Amino acid sequence: MRELPGKLDERELERLFSGRSRLVAALARREDPLEVAEDVIAELSEDEKIEALNAHPRIGEASAEQHGEEPDVLAELGELNRAYEAKFGFKFVVFVAGRPRREILPVLRERLGRERAEELETGLSELVAIARDRWTRT
């Protein structure tokens, strides 16, 4: 397991955070970007926070962390993702950590019952956890 880096460029951060965003650009200018990510996020506007979440793939879409699953699970994830995005205005982000998508369904259902501000904070926290995990596993 690797220690968190002292410096990363935008390309490396784009890989860790699933795409280009103003969060990634801000982190590339900082020392210890994965350690200070929460502080940098706190400085962002709401639009910039949403941009960072929306760079991440939807649960149920193909990615290295998400493994194959049954069609009924994928259909329900699609339906819940649409409901989540309609309610909150940004993508659902959760640290999957190798769990089957079926195990994410109750998490998504529970988070749909939250308030928007809490969910924005949770999604960003999960995004940082994903980036840190990607770094330590590579």
Image: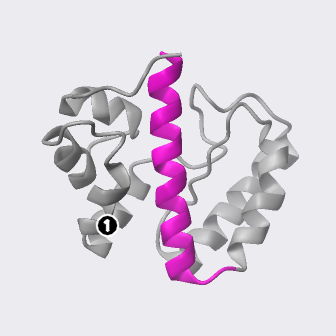
In the image, 61: left or right of 112?
Answer: left
In the image, 78: left or right of 31?
Answer: right
In the picture of the structure, the residue carrying the numbered disc 1 is 42
Where does the image place residue 17, in percent across and percent down from the top left? 39, 40
Identify the residue shown where x is 25% and y is 45%.
24
**Residue stretch rendered in magenta on the structure:** 114-138
The residue under label 1 is which amino acid type?
Ala
Indicate whether residue 136 is drawn in magenta: yes
In the image, 103: left or right of 11?
Answer: right
Q: Is residue 135 or residue 64 the one in the foreground?
A: 135
Where does the image place residue 104, in percent across and percent down from the top left? 77, 50
SS for dot 1: helix
Name above or below for residue 82 compared with residue 130: below
Name above or below for residue 129 compared with residue 44: above
Q: Is residue 103 or residue 134 the one in the foreground?
A: 134
Indicate whether residue 20 is drawn in magenta: no
Identify the residue shown where x is 64% and y is 62%.
81
Identify the residue shown where x is 47% and y is 67%.
90
Q: Quadrant of residue 67?
A: top right
Name above or below for residue 136 compared with residue 89: above
Judged from this view, the residue extending furthest toward the bottom is 115
Magenta part, dominant SS: helix
Q: How crowded is mark 1: few (under 14 residues within 10 Å), some or many (20 or more)?
A: few
Where does the image place residue 62, in percent across and percent down from the top left? 59, 33
Identify the residue shown where x is 87% and y is 48%.
72
Number of residue marks: 1
Indicate how the structure is coloured in the image. Answer: one colour
Q: In which quarter of the image is residue 66?
A: top right
Where does the image place residue 1, in percent across and percent down from the top left? 54, 16
